Image (tube, rainbow, N blue to C red):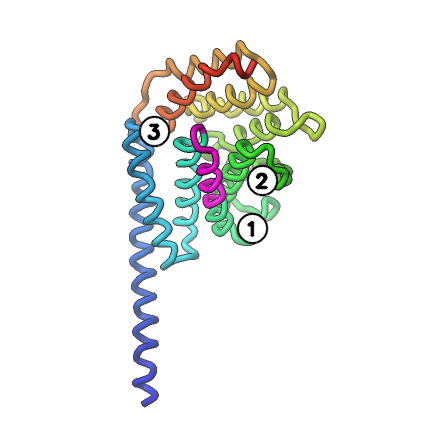
Amino acid sequence: MRGLLLLPLAALIAGCSLNRTAARVTSGVIDRGLPAVFSQSDTEYVKEALPANLQLMEILLRSDPKNRKLLVDAAEGFCGYAFMFLEDDSPARASVFYLKGQAYAERALGRVTPATARRKDVPALFWTTFCKASYMNINRDDPDAIAEMPDLEPAARAILKLDPGYYYNGAQSILGAYYSIRPRMFGGDPEKAKEHFELALKGGGGEFLLNRYMYARMGAVAAQDEDLFVKLLNEVISAPPRDGDTRLPDEVARIKAKRLLEKKDELF
């Protein structure tokens, strides 16, 4: 009788194990396939196709909730989608996506802090910080969002110490945004912002067009440097297309740069 009672439990455990195994195999396919998404040149195609992949990641995480690689991919997916396709026209929707991406990245971090982080923690730490900074930027009137601003700097500096070139010098862009967003009376500094954005353009970050776009949008506007603003955006717009893993963000940067340039008179 006891053996009969244990059969359903054994079946359930086996089913959970199989689901977890299937989730890990599929998540590996997703992780290896992400570069193919970012190599696309058709932004509308990705805008329409990516939500289904984000939903698939969430389904897989139900079966394998501690899959760190999948958690980081989900964070990158949700935050990247919000930044590329939502925040300009639908900041409310973008905010939801940023918070969801941040939550997945924080789950990947677990109890790791900037002070205890190691190189292997950089992806989770970066996307936690990127999502948080992006959410703050489009919710500057929300005191609860701005209250977390001091968290950005130690996280970004930890990334610079552990893996300075990660995501095309992304931590430098985060610090540039940090000094641009923060009010002067609370440590904001347009000159420091420009210094960090200039560092973001060094090495592998120089050809990543979103770095130049963010420099214009955040650093040049904060410094009220109209000439720099125009120069950077025209460099983005006129940059020749490059095949590879940055083709999609480069194309998005080009579209965003054209839109932002049209708003010049509102910003200066």
Sequence-wise, the earlier of marks 1 and 3 is 1
Q: Secondary structure at mark 1?
A: loop
Marker disc for residue 112: 1
Marker disc for residue 187: none
Give the residue drawn at x 43%, y 13%.
234
The magenta-colored residue range is 88-101
- Main SS, magenta residues: helix
Residue 90 inside the magenta-drawn segment: yes
Question: Could you tell me the amino acid type at mark 1?
Answer: Val
Q: Is residue 37 above or below residue 195?
A: below
Direction from residue 61 to residue 186 in the image, left or right: right
Residue 178, x across and y down, in percent: 59, 30
Marker disc for residue 155: 2
Mark whose residue sits in front, 2 or 3: 3
Please identify the quadrant where the C terminus is shown: top right
Q: Quadrant of residue 261?
A: top left
Between 31 and 65, the one lying in front of the other is 65
Give the residue drawn at x 35%, y 49%.
57
Direction from residue 264 to residue 34 in the image, left or right: left
Q: Residue under label 3, please give it.
A: 248
- The reply to whether the C-beta atoms of the residues labelled 1 and 3 are less than 8 Å apart is no
Please identify the quadrant where the N terminus is shown: bottom left
Residue 95 inside the magenta-drawn segment: yes
